[in-house]
Amino acid sequence: MKAAVFHGIKEVRLEDIEIPQIKSDEVLVRIRAALTCGTDRKMYLRGHPLFTPPFVFGHEFAGEVVKVGSKVKDFQEGVRVVAANSAPCNHCYYCKIGQQSMCENITLRLSGAFAEYVEVLGPITSQNLLEIPSGLSYKEAALVEPLACVVHGVENSNIALGDTVVINGLGPIGLMYVQLARLKGARVIATDIKRQRLSLAKKLGADEVIDISKAEDAVGAVRKLTERGRGVDVAIEATGIPEVWEKTILMVRKGGIANLFGGCPSGTRITIDTKLLHYSQITIKGIFHHTPQYVKRALNLISQGRIDADSLITDEFPLSNFPRVLDMLVNQEGIKIAVIP
Protein backbone atom coordinates (compact mmCIF):
# COMPACT_ATOMS: atom_id res chain seq x y z
CA MET A 1 0.00 0.00 0.00
CA LYS A 2 0.97 3.66 -0.29
CA ALA A 3 1.76 5.44 2.98
CA ALA A 4 3.32 8.65 4.29
CA VAL A 5 6.12 7.35 6.52
CA PHE A 6 7.72 9.46 9.25
CA HIS A 7 11.49 8.87 9.38
CA GLY A 8 12.53 11.79 11.57
CA ILE A 9 12.05 15.49 12.20
CA LYS A 10 10.95 17.16 8.95
CA GLU A 11 11.39 13.90 7.08
CA VAL A 12 8.18 12.24 5.85
CA ARG A 13 8.24 10.22 2.63
CA LEU A 14 5.59 8.55 0.48
CA GLU A 15 6.50 4.88 0.25
CA ASP A 16 5.17 1.46 -0.73
CA ILE A 17 4.88 -0.68 2.40
CA GLU A 18 3.14 -3.91 3.37
CA ILE A 19 -0.55 -3.85 4.27
CA PRO A 20 -0.78 -4.37 8.06
CA GLN A 21 -1.50 -7.86 9.38
CA ILE A 22 -4.18 -7.96 12.06
CA LYS A 23 -4.43 -10.02 15.26
CA SER A 24 -7.49 -11.93 16.38
CA ASP A 25 -8.94 -8.96 18.33
CA GLU A 26 -8.25 -6.35 15.64
CA VAL A 27 -9.82 -5.11 12.42
CA LEU A 28 -8.28 -3.84 9.19
CA VAL A 29 -9.77 -0.61 7.83
CA ARG A 30 -9.48 0.79 4.33
CA ILE A 31 -9.02 4.52 4.94
CA ARG A 32 -11.43 6.71 3.01
CA ALA A 33 -10.49 10.05 4.60
CA ALA A 34 -7.78 11.21 7.00
CA LEU A 35 -7.39 14.67 8.54
CA THR A 36 -4.41 16.75 9.61
CA CYS A 37 -4.16 18.17 13.12
CA GLY A 38 -1.93 20.29 15.35
CA THR A 39 -0.30 17.19 16.84
CA ASP A 40 0.81 16.16 13.34
CA ARG A 41 2.44 19.56 12.90
CA LYS A 42 4.25 19.38 16.23
CA MET A 43 5.37 15.81 15.57
CA TYR A 44 6.69 16.74 12.11
CA LEU A 45 8.65 19.71 13.48
CA ARG A 46 10.01 18.19 16.70
CA GLY A 47 9.23 14.47 16.79
CA HIS A 48 7.36 12.64 19.55
CA PRO A 49 8.80 11.11 22.74
CA LEU A 50 6.47 8.08 22.65
CA PHE A 51 7.16 6.92 19.09
CA THR A 52 10.33 5.73 17.40
CA PRO A 53 10.61 6.15 13.60
CA PRO A 54 9.83 4.85 11.12
CA PHE A 55 6.02 4.84 11.39
CA VAL A 56 3.06 5.87 9.27
CA PHE A 57 2.13 9.49 9.89
CA GLY A 58 -1.31 10.73 11.06
CA HIS A 59 -4.05 9.49 13.40
CA GLU A 60 -7.44 11.00 12.47
CA PHE A 61 -9.30 8.79 9.99
CA ALA A 62 -12.52 7.11 8.92
CA GLY A 63 -13.04 4.24 6.53
CA GLU A 64 -14.58 0.81 6.01
CA VAL A 65 -13.79 -2.53 7.60
CA VAL A 66 -12.17 -4.93 5.11
CA LYS A 67 -10.98 -7.68 7.47
CA VAL A 68 -12.09 -8.80 10.92
CA GLY A 69 -10.13 -10.78 13.52
CA SER A 70 -11.58 -14.08 14.72
CA LYS A 71 -12.40 -12.74 18.19
CA VAL A 72 -14.15 -9.57 16.97
CA LYS A 73 -17.93 -9.94 17.17
CA ASP A 74 -19.31 -6.41 16.82
CA PHE A 75 -18.02 -5.53 13.33
CA GLN A 76 -18.24 -7.09 9.88
CA GLU A 77 -16.61 -6.43 6.55
CA GLY A 78 -18.09 -3.45 4.75
CA VAL A 79 -19.14 -1.53 7.87
CA ARG A 80 -18.24 2.18 7.79
CA VAL A 81 -16.28 3.08 10.93
CA VAL A 82 -14.35 5.80 12.72
CA ALA A 83 -11.80 5.10 15.45
CA ALA A 84 -10.31 7.18 18.24
CA ASN A 85 -6.55 7.00 18.76
CA SER A 86 -6.51 5.36 22.18
CA ALA A 87 -8.33 3.20 24.70
CA PRO A 88 -8.05 3.08 28.51
CA CYS A 89 -7.30 -0.10 30.48
CA ASN A 90 -10.27 0.42 32.88
CA HIS A 91 -8.31 -1.27 35.69
CA CYS A 92 -5.69 1.22 36.90
CA TYR A 93 -6.13 3.77 39.68
CA TYR A 94 -7.09 6.62 37.35
CA CYS A 95 -9.61 4.60 35.36
CA LYS A 96 -11.25 3.45 38.60
CA ILE A 97 -11.73 7.04 39.80
CA GLY A 98 -13.22 8.13 36.47
CA GLN A 99 -10.17 9.81 34.95
CA GLN A 100 -9.64 7.53 31.95
CA SER A 101 -7.69 10.15 30.01
CA MET A 102 -4.97 9.73 32.66
CA CYS A 103 -4.90 5.93 32.30
CA GLU A 104 -1.56 4.45 33.37
CA ASN A 105 -1.79 1.64 30.79
CA ILE A 106 -3.44 3.49 27.93
CA THR A 107 -3.32 1.96 24.47
CA LEU A 108 -2.22 4.94 22.36
CA ARG A 109 -1.97 5.02 18.59
CA LEU A 110 -0.78 8.33 17.10
CA SER A 111 0.09 6.87 13.72
CA GLY A 112 -1.27 5.05 10.70
CA ALA A 113 -3.81 7.41 9.13
CA PHE A 114 -2.03 8.77 6.03
CA ALA A 115 -2.10 5.45 4.21
CA GLU A 116 -4.47 3.19 2.31
CA TYR A 117 -5.07 0.78 5.21
CA VAL A 118 -4.69 0.80 8.98
CA GLU A 119 -5.06 -1.86 11.66
CA VAL A 120 -7.19 -0.89 14.66
CA LEU A 121 -5.66 -2.28 17.84
CA GLY A 122 -7.69 -4.64 20.02
CA PRO A 123 -8.47 -2.34 22.98
CA ILE A 124 -9.47 0.45 20.58
CA THR A 125 -11.64 -1.95 18.55
CA SER A 126 -13.53 -2.99 21.68
CA GLN A 127 -13.99 0.53 23.12
CA ASN A 128 -13.42 3.31 20.62
CA LEU A 129 -14.29 1.95 17.18
CA LEU A 130 -17.72 3.26 16.19
CA GLU A 131 -20.01 2.68 13.24
CA ILE A 132 -20.60 5.81 11.16
CA PRO A 133 -24.30 6.72 10.95
CA SER A 134 -25.86 6.76 7.50
CA GLY A 135 -25.77 10.17 5.86
CA LEU A 136 -22.50 11.14 7.50
CA SER A 137 -19.47 11.43 5.20
CA TYR A 138 -16.08 9.90 5.95
CA LYS A 139 -14.53 13.38 6.17
CA GLU A 140 -17.09 14.52 8.73
CA ALA A 141 -16.70 11.35 10.77
CA ALA A 142 -12.92 11.75 10.88
CA LEU A 143 -13.44 14.82 13.10
CA VAL A 144 -14.55 12.59 15.98
CA GLU A 145 -11.19 12.27 17.77
CA PRO A 146 -10.27 15.97 18.04
CA LEU A 147 -13.86 16.90 18.81
CA ALA A 148 -13.90 14.33 21.64
CA CYS A 149 -10.97 16.19 23.22
CA VAL A 150 -12.90 19.46 23.00
CA VAL A 151 -16.05 17.89 24.46
CA HIS A 152 -13.84 16.79 27.39
CA GLY A 153 -12.55 20.35 27.75
CA VAL A 154 -15.98 21.99 27.60
CA GLU A 155 -17.51 19.57 30.08
CA ASN A 156 -14.69 20.29 32.54
CA SER A 157 -14.89 24.06 32.12
CA ASN A 158 -18.29 24.31 33.83
CA ILE A 159 -19.71 26.68 31.21
CA ALA A 160 -23.20 27.80 32.25
CA LEU A 161 -26.04 29.48 30.34
CA GLY A 162 -25.29 33.16 29.90
CA ASP A 163 -21.58 32.90 30.75
CA THR A 164 -19.02 34.92 28.83
CA VAL A 165 -16.24 32.75 27.45
CA VAL A 166 -13.05 33.75 25.62
CA ILE A 167 -11.26 31.33 23.32
CA ASN A 168 -7.66 32.24 22.51
CA GLY A 169 -6.43 30.61 19.31
CA LEU A 170 -8.70 29.69 16.41
CA GLY A 171 -7.13 26.66 14.85
CA PRO A 172 -9.34 23.57 14.48
CA ILE A 173 -9.52 23.04 18.26
CA GLY A 174 -10.35 26.66 19.03
CA LEU A 175 -13.06 26.75 16.36
CA MET A 176 -14.61 23.61 17.82
CA TYR A 177 -14.57 25.29 21.23
CA VAL A 178 -16.42 28.26 19.71
CA GLN A 179 -19.20 25.98 18.50
CA LEU A 180 -19.53 23.95 21.69
CA ALA A 181 -19.45 27.02 23.94
CA ARG A 182 -22.32 28.43 21.89
CA LEU A 183 -24.22 25.17 22.34
CA LYS A 184 -23.77 25.63 26.10
CA GLY A 185 -25.52 29.00 25.81
CA ALA A 186 -22.44 31.16 26.35
CA ARG A 187 -21.52 34.54 24.90
CA VAL A 188 -18.29 33.86 23.01
CA ILE A 189 -15.28 36.12 22.47
CA ALA A 190 -12.69 34.68 20.06
CA THR A 191 -9.12 35.89 19.51
CA ASP A 192 -6.45 35.11 16.93
CA ILE A 193 -3.96 36.84 14.62
CA LYS A 194 -5.29 35.51 11.31
CA ARG A 195 -8.15 37.26 9.51
CA GLN A 196 -9.45 34.05 7.89
CA ARG A 197 -9.79 32.32 11.24
CA LEU A 198 -11.42 35.33 12.89
CA SER A 199 -13.98 35.50 10.07
CA LEU A 200 -14.67 31.79 10.37
CA ALA A 201 -15.11 32.08 14.15
CA LYS A 202 -17.71 34.78 13.55
CA LYS A 203 -19.50 32.53 11.06
CA LEU A 204 -19.47 29.66 13.55
CA GLY A 205 -21.11 31.71 16.28
CA ALA A 206 -18.56 33.93 18.04
CA ASP A 207 -20.26 37.08 19.31
CA GLU A 208 -17.06 39.14 19.31
CA VAL A 209 -13.71 38.60 17.59
CA ILE A 210 -10.41 40.33 18.37
CA ASP A 211 -7.37 40.50 16.10
CA ILE A 212 -4.66 40.21 18.75
CA SER A 213 -2.00 41.34 16.29
CA LYS A 214 -3.63 44.77 16.29
CA ALA A 215 -4.28 44.99 20.03
CA GLU A 216 -1.63 46.65 22.19
CA ASP A 217 -3.09 44.97 25.28
CA ALA A 218 -4.76 41.61 24.52
CA VAL A 219 -5.90 41.13 28.12
CA GLY A 220 -7.37 44.63 28.26
CA ALA A 221 -9.11 44.17 24.92
CA VAL A 222 -10.91 41.08 26.20
CA ARG A 223 -11.74 42.55 29.61
CA LYS A 224 -13.18 45.64 27.90
CA LEU A 225 -15.86 43.41 26.41
CA THR A 226 -17.01 42.21 29.85
CA GLU A 227 -19.26 44.01 32.32
CA ARG A 228 -17.25 46.67 34.20
CA GLY A 229 -14.09 45.05 32.84
CA ARG A 230 -14.24 42.32 35.46
CA GLY A 231 -13.13 39.54 33.09
CA VAL A 232 -14.69 36.45 31.56
CA ASP A 233 -16.29 33.56 33.40
CA VAL A 234 -14.24 31.00 31.48
CA ALA A 235 -11.03 31.55 29.48
CA ILE A 236 -9.81 28.81 27.14
CA GLU A 237 -6.30 28.64 25.71
CA ALA A 238 -5.93 26.72 22.42
CA THR A 239 -2.52 27.69 21.03
CA GLY A 240 0.07 25.85 23.12
CA ILE A 241 2.10 29.05 23.58
CA PRO A 242 3.25 29.77 27.18
CA GLU A 243 2.79 33.54 26.76
CA VAL A 244 -0.82 32.98 25.73
CA TRP A 245 -1.32 30.69 28.76
CA GLU A 246 -0.31 33.61 31.00
CA LYS A 247 -2.59 36.08 29.23
CA THR A 248 -5.49 33.64 29.33
CA ILE A 249 -5.26 33.46 33.14
CA LEU A 250 -5.30 37.27 33.35
CA MET A 251 -8.55 37.45 31.36
CA VAL A 252 -10.55 35.55 34.00
CA ARG A 253 -12.83 37.25 36.53
CA LYS A 254 -12.62 36.55 40.26
CA GLY A 255 -13.79 33.00 40.86
CA GLY A 256 -13.53 32.16 37.16
CA ILE A 257 -11.92 29.24 35.34
CA ALA A 258 -8.90 29.16 33.03
CA ASN A 259 -8.75 26.06 30.81
CA LEU A 260 -5.18 25.70 29.53
CA PHE A 261 -5.81 23.25 26.72
CA GLY A 262 -3.02 23.81 24.20
CA GLY A 263 0.02 21.64 24.82
CA CYS A 264 3.29 23.60 25.12
CA PRO A 265 6.79 22.24 24.38
CA SER A 266 8.27 20.16 27.20
CA GLY A 267 10.32 22.18 29.67
CA THR A 268 8.55 25.50 29.15
CA ARG A 269 7.36 27.50 32.15
CA ILE A 270 4.78 30.18 32.94
CA THR A 271 4.61 32.77 35.70
CA ILE A 272 1.49 33.34 37.81
CA ASP A 273 0.88 36.18 40.27
CA THR A 274 0.25 34.30 43.54
CA LYS A 275 -1.82 37.19 44.91
CA LEU A 276 -4.11 37.00 41.88
CA LEU A 277 -4.46 33.24 42.12
CA HIS A 278 -5.19 33.20 45.86
CA TYR A 279 -7.31 36.30 46.47
CA SER A 280 -9.28 36.02 43.24
CA GLN A 281 -9.96 32.30 43.76
CA ILE A 282 -9.17 31.50 40.14
CA THR A 283 -9.34 27.86 39.08
CA ILE A 284 -6.67 26.81 36.58
CA LYS A 285 -7.18 23.53 34.76
CA GLY A 286 -5.14 21.48 32.36
CA ILE A 287 -7.31 19.32 30.09
CA PHE A 288 -5.84 16.41 28.17
CA HIS A 289 -7.14 13.89 25.64
CA HIS A 290 -10.53 12.15 25.75
CA THR A 291 -12.43 9.13 27.11
CA PRO A 292 -14.76 6.62 25.42
CA GLN A 293 -17.84 8.52 26.59
CA TYR A 294 -16.57 11.74 25.01
CA VAL A 295 -15.73 9.93 21.76
CA LYS A 296 -19.32 8.70 21.54
CA ARG A 297 -20.69 12.16 22.37
CA ALA A 298 -18.51 13.68 19.67
CA LEU A 299 -19.90 11.32 17.02
CA ASN A 300 -23.42 12.15 18.19
CA LEU A 301 -22.77 15.89 17.88
CA ILE A 302 -21.43 15.51 14.34
CA SER A 303 -24.23 13.20 13.20
CA GLN A 304 -26.85 15.55 14.67
CA GLY A 305 -25.43 18.44 12.67
CA ARG A 306 -24.44 20.39 15.78
CA ILE A 307 -20.92 20.90 14.41
CA ASP A 308 -20.23 22.65 11.10
CA ALA A 309 -17.76 20.12 9.76
CA ASP A 310 -17.60 21.55 6.24
CA SER A 311 -16.28 24.88 7.51
CA LEU A 312 -13.51 23.15 9.46
CA ILE A 313 -12.30 21.00 6.53
CA THR A 314 -11.01 23.69 4.20
CA ASP A 315 -8.85 21.69 1.78
CA GLU A 316 -8.64 18.24 0.23
CA PHE A 317 -5.79 16.41 -1.51
CA PRO A 318 -5.05 12.88 -2.66
CA LEU A 319 -2.40 10.98 -0.71
CA SER A 320 -0.11 11.29 -3.75
CA ASN A 321 0.08 15.03 -3.12
CA PHE A 322 1.15 14.68 0.52
CA PRO A 323 4.20 16.98 0.17
CA ARG A 324 1.76 19.83 -0.49
CA VAL A 325 -0.20 18.83 2.60
CA LEU A 326 2.98 19.03 4.69
CA ASP A 327 3.77 22.50 3.35
CA MET A 328 0.31 23.73 4.30
CA LEU A 329 0.52 22.07 7.69
CA VAL A 330 3.86 23.70 8.55
CA ASN A 331 2.71 27.13 7.35
CA GLN A 332 -0.66 26.77 9.12
CA GLU A 333 -2.64 27.30 5.93
CA GLY A 334 -6.31 26.43 6.04
CA ILE A 335 -7.91 24.70 9.02
CA LYS A 336 -8.24 20.93 8.55
CA ILE A 337 -6.86 19.26 5.44
CA ALA A 338 -8.50 16.05 4.23
CA VAL A 339 -6.20 13.44 2.71
CA ILE A 340 -8.02 10.97 0.45
CA PRO A 341 -6.04 7.76 -0.26
Image (cartoon, rainbow, N blue to C red):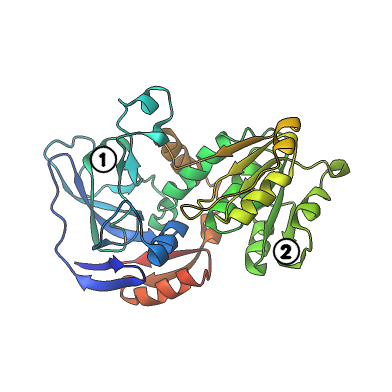
Q: Is residue 318 visible?
A: yes
* Residue 137 drawn at (x, y percent): 41, 55
SS class, disc 2: strand
| Residue at screen point 30% across, 67% down | 8
- Numbered tag placed on residue 211 in the rendering: 2
> Of the residues tagged 2 and 1, which is closer to the observer?
2
Residue 130 is at least partly visible in this image: no
Residue 210 sits in quarter: bottom right
Q: Nearer the viewer, residue 90 or 119?
A: 90
Task: Report the side of 66 relative to 254 (left or right).
Answer: left
Q: Residues within 10 Å of mark 2 (few under 14, many from 20)?
A: some
Local crowd at mark 1 within 10 Å, few (<14), some, or many (≥20)? many
Q: Amino acid at mark 2?
A: Asp
Q: Reply above or below: 141 against 273.
A: below
Q: Position of residue 209 (x, y in %)?
A: 73, 57
**In the rendered view, would you say 143 is above or below 278?**
below
The answer to whether residue 319 is left or right of residue 25 is right
Where residue 306 sits, quadrant-wise, is top right
| Image point (41%, 58%), residue name | 139
Query: On residue 125, which mark appears?
Result: 1
List x then y, in percent, for residue 274.
70, 37
- In what element is the residue under mark 1? helix
Percent position of residue 96, x then y: 37, 22
Q: Closer to the N terminus: mark 2 or mark 1?
A: 1
Viewed as shown, does residue 289 lie left or right of 227? left
